[in-house]
Image: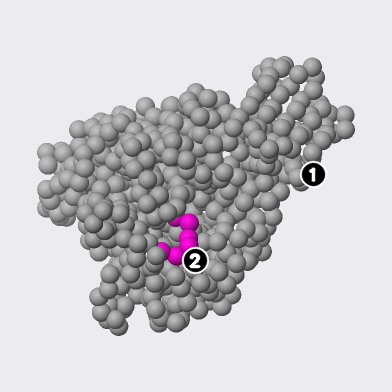
Amino acid sequence: MELHFTGDVTSILEGLKLIEENLSIQLSDDGYPIHVVKQDGHLHVMNHNGQGEICFEKPIHFFRGLGLFLEHYRKENEFDLSEEPRFEMSGVMLDASRNAVPTVSDVEKLLQRMAVMGLDTLMLYTEDTYEVKEHPYFGYMRGRYSTEELKACDDYASKLGIEMIPCIQSLGHLREALKWNYASTFKDTDDILLVDEPGTYQFLENCIRAASEPFRTKRIHIGMDETFQLGLGKYLEKHGYENHIDIMNRHLQKVVSITEKYGLKPMIWSDMYFPLFSEDSKYRDENGKIREDILATIPDVELVYWNYYRKEQEVYEKDFQHHKQLGRNAIFAGGAWTWNGIVPNYGKAIVTTEAAMAASKKEGIKEVFVTLWGDNGAETPFSTSLPILQLFAEHTYQKEVTLEHTAERYAFCGEGNFDDFMVLKRLDETPGVMKDNMNSSMTSKVLLYQDILIGLYDENSKGLSLGEHYEKLVSEIEKAKHNNPKWESLFDFYEQLARVLSVKAEIGIKIKEVYEKKDYEQMRSILSKLDWIQTNVDQLRQKHRRVWFESYKPFGWEVLDIRYGGVIIRIDSVKYRIQEWLEGRISAIEELEEERLRHDGPWEIVEGLVGGNVYHRIVTAGNFSL
């Protein structure tokens, strides 16, 4: 469609040129006329008597408005739409540290979709995946971004009205950065920096300068979450025991002095202050208020409250109120649940988002963003997050939001069928798993990687008919693949995952049953199934590889090659062990003589899930790396 824009086009013209191909539009003096008006207030989009108009306050509102215009123009001749932004900032945090590092090109594609959705902020979460010239081993062979790459992303985002904010760590979550010898003098534990050590602050100054330099913004996220072992490593040896919050505050003050030196405005994850919130907290005075001397030690930082676990709106409301006791309005971080294993957990993402966004609006929260973590290998493609980004976007511009409305918008902004994407959650949300997978079962991951002879999750999945469940899913995902040509390779990957699991999910259970019956004939027939699994797991690896290299740098794929390779090669040994038994060279298969127990790892302490864990705890009960 050819369009001709008139009016206040200065701030949006460069961005228009970036997204015209993606939106199938072309700028032309002979195109359909749309008048552009920059003004304070709500977003207004209309088409009347052959003339379009988009009124906006910020450039990001214009790009959302353009999407609304095009979407409605294709369905109706005349329309008049108004939206009121509910938040001053609404954005995305993209994990580039847990194995997968999105390419600059893929970041640009995400920025285009964010612009049309109306999301105005992007944080790249980089623990060690950014260049720090003083420390060549920082991010070595991990796909780190160069300064030039980050600057290119920021330039691109700026043209679309999107602010990019560096998001790093300055205390914990630094295991990959601190594993090299250069860091031996300033680490407390394997993943936490040594507080009060001069070398620590020189290192952090180098990092903060390098992380912030490519970006226009003066905001920076400096992390500091989940430092549970702070002060219990080398610090304890040097200084003795000290209260966790006291160490944190002193360290934070020193880091803030560095950010002030560079004119930066820092934010941190707020969980370090959660001990202050409990009613029996020793940090409260006789009137039940947080003590003034404690409040005085908290530096001037913005607090980011992260929670993507609860479906009760009142939980979020109460926590927002707790943050106000610290004299500040929290920034809220929700989650798209891209880190559940191999498959997005849409059920949990939707119910937690609905509760959190309702609470955010009620409590007057001004800034929100959605996290796209990639825990334990980033096996779930980040593109699966787009339906949840759409939900966040709709909550940003609407008081009330329905999934039906979100699906309509996603058909335009994400070029995908919302309901078809929701089918993917059933790869994990299987029989035996609670509704919406609130306890985060990683069913597909544990069944793909678990060893066929060891069968650590066989007792968990026994009697659930999971093979039949996955067999039905194959045809449903195949249908979804044909409905979503833009996402063919993504659905092709998940179709193959369902196909593999339709046989592999219960093969270990079957082998043990046949072995115990001493049914040699049936055991021989199982060997051909093992050949089929081996071939199809390799095909799954190749389909996953295609999806990976469409979006990410090559670094990190070697980890998944090794994981898939482990499944494939272990099947060789499974066949060898069975053949040895069938031919009488061994009298027993010891792995099958062992009683099967329910997996008793940390994920299995609750009901309503088949299983979940990190890779090395799925594949063996032994020591994987020591």
Is residue 81 rendered to the left or right of residue 559?
right
Compared to residue 416, the image places residue 332 above or below, namely below
Identify residue type, mark 2: Asp
Q: Is residue 560 above or below residue 626?
A: above
Viewer-proximal residue, 284 or 76? Answer: 284
Q: Position of residue 127 (x, y in %)?
A: 47, 63
Residue drawn at the location 68% of the way across and 29% of the way down: 44
Residue drawn 79% across the image and 40% down it:
9
- Which sits in the foreground, 98 or 483? 98
Q: Which residues are magenta?
A: 298-303
Q: Residue at x 24, y 37 (%)?
A: 608
Q: Position of residue 433 (x, y in %)?
A: 27, 35
Residue 106 lies in the magenta stretch = no
Q: Secondary structure at mark 2?
A: loop
**Residue lying at 79% horizontally and 17% vertically, measured from the top left:** 49
For mark 1, what is the residue? Answer: 10
Q: Which quadrant would the N terminus be assigned to in this image? A: top right
* Residue 11 location (% of width, % of height): 75, 45
Q: Quadrant of the C terminus?
A: bottom left
Q: Which residue is mark 2?
A: 128
Give the image quarter of residue 448: top left
Residue 510 visible at all? no
Q: Earlier in the sequence, mark 1 or mark 2?
A: 1
- 2, above or below 110, in the image: above
Residue 223 lies, in percent from the top left, at 45, 61
C-alpha gap between disc 1 and disc 2:
37 Å
Residue lying at the far front of the rendered structure: 287
